[in-house]
Amino acid sequence: MSFIESLTAYQLDTLKEVGNIGSGNAATSLSTLLNRKVDMTVPAVRVVGFDEMMDLVGGPDKIIVSVYLRIQGEAPGNMFFVLSPPEAEVFVKEMTGIDNFNLENPPFDEMGLSALQELGNILAGSYLSALSDFIKVLLQPSVPLLHIDMAAAILTQGLMELSQESDYAIIIDTIINEEGNNSEPIKGHFFLLPDPESFPKIFDRLGVTS
């Protein structure tokens, strides 16, 4: 059994707590950016296999919107923030007021793409900052890269390092809800893929080594 497959419920609850701290920081940043109150929650943290991860986003051929960051520092790895195109379009319209923004027919509006990139940057940066503070390990995000492509094409690259040891990843569900907005909350997923050698360091610092 690989390390990631042996994670206990307590260890996952600890990661969820870190996620909630990060989402609180991200909500504050988004509220400032949008000049409106935004709430964020982390309803679940799960460990899933590669196939289940693909199913989660609708299958390997499903078009997804992803912001990718390489985690640099003492516990390197990969992180994706993933949205469906309709969810991404809703966010861009809320953030920029561009009512006709769509991800069906390129070329896409550059301001809308920049908004998506900034969303991923804020969310991933807030989560990594919370995790870094919690475990006292330096973690820094790279410049975020926005991709709109089939799920398999985007996620397979990030799994290359991890798949040397395991085909599993940590999924952090995220719900973004704007106060006073009656539309459905925006649901996204973080895919956290620390490099194999980073797992023991992270969980040792969390005090929850198996």
Image (tube, helix red, strand yellow):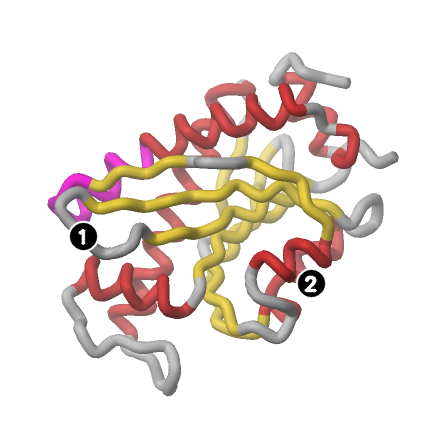
139 falls in the magenta region: no
Chief SS of the magenta region: helix
**Residue under label 2:** 156
28 falls in the magenta region: yes
Q: Is residue 128 left or right of residue 166?
A: left
Q: Is residue 137 left or right of residue 188?
A: right
Q: Give the SS element for disc 2.
A: helix
Residue at image position (77%, 18%) is 210
**Which numbered circle lies on residue 182?**
1
Q: Nearer the viewer, residue 84 or 144?
A: 84
Q: Quadrant of the N terminus?
A: top right
Above or below, comparing residue 64 to residue 144 in the picture:
below
Residue at image position (71%, 41%) is 195
Foreground tag (1 vs 2): 1
Query: Is tag 1's residue or tag 2's residue first in the polypeptide sequence?
Result: 2
Q: Nearer the viewer, residue 38 or 125?
A: 38
Span shown in magenta: 25-37
The amino acid type of the residue labelled 2 equals Thr
The amino acid type of the residue labelled 1 equals Asn
Residue at image position (63%, 61%) is 55
Above or below, comparing residue 146 to residue 136 in the picture:
below
State which quadrant residue 58 falls in: bottom right
Above or below, comparing residue 17 to residue 84 in the picture:
above
Residue at image position (53%, 33%) is 139
Question: Residue 202 appears at what percent x and percent y?
Answer: 65, 25
Question: Residue 8 appears at what percent x and percent y?
Answer: 70, 24
Question: Residue 87 appears at what percent x and percent y?
Answer: 36, 62
**Which numbered circle lies on residue 75?**
none
